[in-house]
Image (cartoon, rainbow, N blue to C red):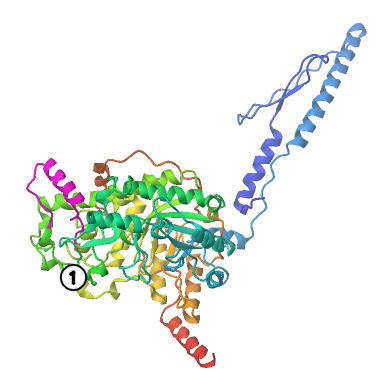
């Protein structure tokens, strides 16, 4: 029986009283005809009181006998009606009001409206390149600690294309991932599964090497232009260029068909986990590191923070596409930026393209290129998500896409690093809201944004960085387009200062309203913590992490029922009609971000708490 608050008890009482007083209209025929039928007239119309009926004159003789017979018939009919009415009432009892909530339970329900679920990203190599679950017993022990001691809601796991379809085209092997999901299920954890169509290795934090499938690389060996390419001709083997999205170069299949078939096979082979509600999110890989972007800042090619990176559109397929677009626009003479956009580790002012004063990005040709470059990325994301929507149609889950938090050079007028990655975000033009609008058509796919743990004050001044302003802009873009936002940390952090920043971004205006419970004005759909490690589980770090999870849960225990905190799972519906690129670009009109508080109201503590952590750490070191 559901519970209700004392405010709603009187409403339920009035409903029951009204139902008991509703008139029962009886249609009868002669006693020998069909049984009496009851008709309930549900009406809220009030009636005036009828005057008392006049008494009939006393009856005598034959008239009296007729009345006695008539009264006898009425009595029989009345008894039948009463019997049927009693039977009907017994069969369909009136609704009873749900039991009252205690004050403590009422407060719990209010605070659950502020609950943000926490997922922990599993190690990149939890399934090895040989398609085996790495140290299943050790993993189970660590997951058990996450669930029982920290109260986390679930885990996020990369499902590597290079592992599952490594044996050959359309030869999928899911055994290790089924074992992984079974362990998570047995430990009471939900799963966010990433369709990882990229290679692992070459990015910040990549601790293992998992390449694309061998047979895909064989195609790349014969035709290197299937990979993203830098102005100098360096090939990036992390992700297939979007220039081959619709080219049947892979044993008769296009890149989009490769991704679609992989997701369809995942659904078929994980049907039991999907049906049970274990898998709650499918994050669709859309580029390097699984993010919707170009591989503009690869460490494997010498990039270092805070270099601006380079445009990655110099494979023959994208070059051909650009020339066709420029010709159609009436400017066949326009060319790709080339050397004018500088090298990986340049600053904006080292280049002609990004210079604040008179840079090429401000010219008509520069604006045309940037619009084309960013639009190709939007179209790619839209195509892959459409296939994901069809693959998982009807499953009770949400689709999601990750957008990279490229915060360096955010305070430079050109936003050079963002432009190189494909986010056309400059003063007077919002580069993230078109992404959110694209996601909205796919049954409200979630926009997952990174660098939620970073503060402006932690960044070197020469990087002209502003992760705080960037996060506010990206999350506001999602909320304005009516899609859910989620966030995660970009780099591993174990300090309380980083946790507090994530708490602030998860609930920008604190628990609502005004700290008294109830739904806050805005909150993220989920937070993913990067990542599970032995370092996280050390005494001091795990103590701070447990406090972080508790505060994300608004000081409530772990709640496995997503509907109780406002995120009920429902079957995925078909994507809406395709949105023209012009309609997506309409969303570039800038609006100020929603206001964020200066600090979170659910802090895990500051300097004093960290001092206590340090003391505990030293005591444990001495005695243990």
Give left or right: position of 271 versus 73: left
Which residue is at a point 64% across and 57% down the rendered structure image? 101
Q: Tell me residue 350's x, y (percent).
A: 11, 68
Which residue is at a point 86% across and 21% down the rendered structure image? 76
- 371 in relation to 42, above or below: below
Which quadrant of the structure image shows residue 305?
bottom left
Which quadrant of the structure image shows residue 161?
bottom left
The residue pinned by badge 1 equals 345
- 362 in relation to 382, above or below: below
Q: Viewer-proximal residue, 105 or 217?
A: 217
Q: Can residue 577 be seen in this snapshot?
A: yes
Give left or right: position of 410 versus 472: left
Stretch of the chain drawn in magenta: 310-337
The residue most toward the right is 61
Q: Residue 311 colored magenta?
A: yes
Which residue is at a point 20% across and 54% down the rendered structure image? 315
Q: Tell me residue 353's x, y (percent).
A: 11, 60
Give left or right: position of 85 versus 400: right
- 397 in relation to 467, above or below: above
- Neighbour tally class for label 1: few under 14, some 14-19, many 20 plus, Cα within 10 Å: some
């Amino acid at each position: 029986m559901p519970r209700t608050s004392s405010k709603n008890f009187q409403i339920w009482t009035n409903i029951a009283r009204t139902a008991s007083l509703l008139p029962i209209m009886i249609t009868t025929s002669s006693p020998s005809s069909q049984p009496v039928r009851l008709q309930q007239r549900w009406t809220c119309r009030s009636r005036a009181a009828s005057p008392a009926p006049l008494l009939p004159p006393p009856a005598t003789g034959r008239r009296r006998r007729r009345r006695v017979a008539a009264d006898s018939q009425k009595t029989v009919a009345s008894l039948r009606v009463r019997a049927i009415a009693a039977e009907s009432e017994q069969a369909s009892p009136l609704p009873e009001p749900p039991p009252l909530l205690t004050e403590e339970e009422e407060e719990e329900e209010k605070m659950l409206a502020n609950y943000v679920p926490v997922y922990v990203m599993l190690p990149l190599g939890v399934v090895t390149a040989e398609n085996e679950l790495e140290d299943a017993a050790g993993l189970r022990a660590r997951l058990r600690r996450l669930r029982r001691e920290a109260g986390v809601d679930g885990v996020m796991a990369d499902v590597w294309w290079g592992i599952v379809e490594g044996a050959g085209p359309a030869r999928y092997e899911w055994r290790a991932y089924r074992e992984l999901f079974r362990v998570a299920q047995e430990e009471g954890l939900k799963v966010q599964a990433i369709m990882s169509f990229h290679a692992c290795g070459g990015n910040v934090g990549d601790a293992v090497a998992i390449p694309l499938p061998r047979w895909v690389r064989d195609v790349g060996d014969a035709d290197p232009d299937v990979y993203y390419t830098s102005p100098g001709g360096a090939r990036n083997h992390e992700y297939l260029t979007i220039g081959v999205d619709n080219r049947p170069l892979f044993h008769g299949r296009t890149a989009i068909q490769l991704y679609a078939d992989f997701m369809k096979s995942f659904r078929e082979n994980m049907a039991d986990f999907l049906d049970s509600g274990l898998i709650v999110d499918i994050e669709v890989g859309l580029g390097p590191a699984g993010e919707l972007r170009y591989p503009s800042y690869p460490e494997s090619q010498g990039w270092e923070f805070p270099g601006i990176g380079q445009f990655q559109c110099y494979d023959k397929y994208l070059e051909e596409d650009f020339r066709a677009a420029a010709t159609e626009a009436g400017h066949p003479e326009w060319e790709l930026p080339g050397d004018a956009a500088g090298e990986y580790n340049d600053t904006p002012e080292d280049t002609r393209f990004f210079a604040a004063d008179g840079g090429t990005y401000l010219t008509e040709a520069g604006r045309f290129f940037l619009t084309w470059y960013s639009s190709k990325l939007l179209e790619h994301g839209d195509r892959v998500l459409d296939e994901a929507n069809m693959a998982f149609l009807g499953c009770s889950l949400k689709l999601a896409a990750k957008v990279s938090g490229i915060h360096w050079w955010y305070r430079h007028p050109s936003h050079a690093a963002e432009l190189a990655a494909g986010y056309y975000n400059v003063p007077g033009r919002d580069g993230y809201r078109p992404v959110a609008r694209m996601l909205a058509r796919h049954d409200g796919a979630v926009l997952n944004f990174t660098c939620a743990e970073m503060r402006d004050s932690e960044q070197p001044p020469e990087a002209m960085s502003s992760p705080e302003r960037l996060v506010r802009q990206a999350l506001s873009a999602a909320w304005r387009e009516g899609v859910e936002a989620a966030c995660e940390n970009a780099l591993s952090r174990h300090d309380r200062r980083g946790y507090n920043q994530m708490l602030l971004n998860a609930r920008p205006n604190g628990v609502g309203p005004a700290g008294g419970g109830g739904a806050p004005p805005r909150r993220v759909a989920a937070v993913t913590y990067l990542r599970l490690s032995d370092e996280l589980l050390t005494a001091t770090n795990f103590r701070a992490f447990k406090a972080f999870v508790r505060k994300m849960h608004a000081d409530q225990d772990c709640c496995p029922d997503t509907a109780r905190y406002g995120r009920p799972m429902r079957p995925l519906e078909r994507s809406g009609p395709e949105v023209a690129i012009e309609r997506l670009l309409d969303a570039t009109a800038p609006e100020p971000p929603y206001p964020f508080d200066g600090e979170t109201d659910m802090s895990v503590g500051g300097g004093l708490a960290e001092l206590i952590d340090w003391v505990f750490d030293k005591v444990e070191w001495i005695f243990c």
